[in-house]
């Protein structure tokens, strides 16, 4: 394998690892967008450097300029990778929201049957949670509240800048979003 192909392969591998990590761990968060914006800024700067090196290599025919151009282009690829993975992070976050809502709606059926048996909604749902499987990623241990006559589910989603709170109340059985 020649050196140029090795650099390109390495840049693609490192860029993909950074992008995947940013997507899977920090999806939808401010940090994810911040890394992508900084990456774009760095990539544009490196592309400008690469263009200058190409220009200089034409006049001085030095291999150093071509080598620097290749390095700049490889680093620009690494820097752009997090931005390329942003759409995947957005889709994963929408899937997380869908899973959390579906989990809560399935739990609502169990809460209705518990109210039919006891006359009120349970103050705690720890017994129901063990039967419902693991909590989705967006739900914390305190996503459920009840006063006995009604209940609500609530979870927060970090949309990058302002968090959005998703709420569901038993009185109207409608999901609402608040920023």
Image (cartoon, rainbow, N blue to C red):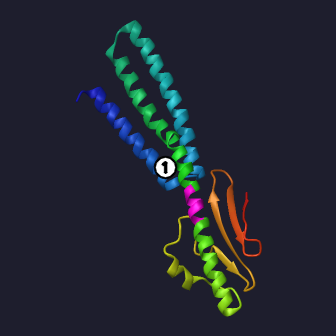
Locate the C terminus by quadrant.
bottom right
Q: Is residue 98 above or below residue 114?
A: above
**In front of the other: 53 or 106:** 106
Which residue is tagged 1? 22
Residue 100 in percent (x, y) is at 58, 66
Q: Is residue 122 visible?
A: no
The residue depicted at 49 percent of the width and 36 percent of the height is: 80
Q: Which residues are magenta?
A: 95-100
Residue pictured at 63% horizontal, 53% vertical: 159
Query: Would you place residue 155 above or below residue 90 in this image?
Result: below
Question: How far from the left and from the top, in percent, is residue 118?
Answer: 67, 92
Circle 1 sits in a helix, a strand or a loop, which is it? helix
Q: Tally the marks.
A: 1
Quadrant for the N terminus in the image: top left
> Residue at position x 74%, y 80% from top?
150
Residue 170, percent across and down? 73, 75
Quadrant in the rendering for residue 174 = bottom right
Up-down relation of residue 169 to residue 125 (above or below): above
Q: Residue furthest top?
A: 59
Left or right of residue 48: residue 57: left
**Measuring 65% from the left and 91% from the top, which residue is drawn there?**
117
Foreground: 148 or 171?
Answer: 171
Please tell me whether residue 146 belongs to the stretch shown in magenta: no
């Amino acid at each position: 394998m020649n050196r140029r192909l090795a650099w390109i392969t390495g840049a693609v591998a490192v860029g993909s690892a950074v992008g995947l990590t940013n997507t899977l761990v920090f999806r939808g968060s401010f940090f994810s967008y911040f890394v992508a914006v900084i990456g774009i800024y760095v990539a544009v700067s490196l592309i400008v450097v690469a263009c200058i090196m190409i220009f200089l290599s034409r006049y001085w025919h030095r291999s150093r300029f071509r080598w620097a151009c290749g390095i700049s282009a490889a680093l620009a690829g690494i820097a752009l990778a997090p931005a390329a993975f942003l759409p995947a992070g957005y889709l994963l976050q929408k899937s997380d929201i869908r899973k959390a809502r579906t989990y809560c709606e399935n739990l609502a059926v169990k809460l209705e049957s518990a109210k039919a048996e006891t006359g009120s909604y349970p103050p705690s749902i720890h017994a129901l949670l063990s039967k419902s499987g693991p909590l989705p990623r967006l739900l914390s241990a305190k996503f459920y509240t009840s006063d006995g006559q009604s209940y609500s589910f609530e979870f927060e989603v970090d949309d990058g800048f302002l968090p959005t709170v998703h709420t569901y109340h038993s009185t109207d059985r409608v999901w609402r979003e608040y920023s």
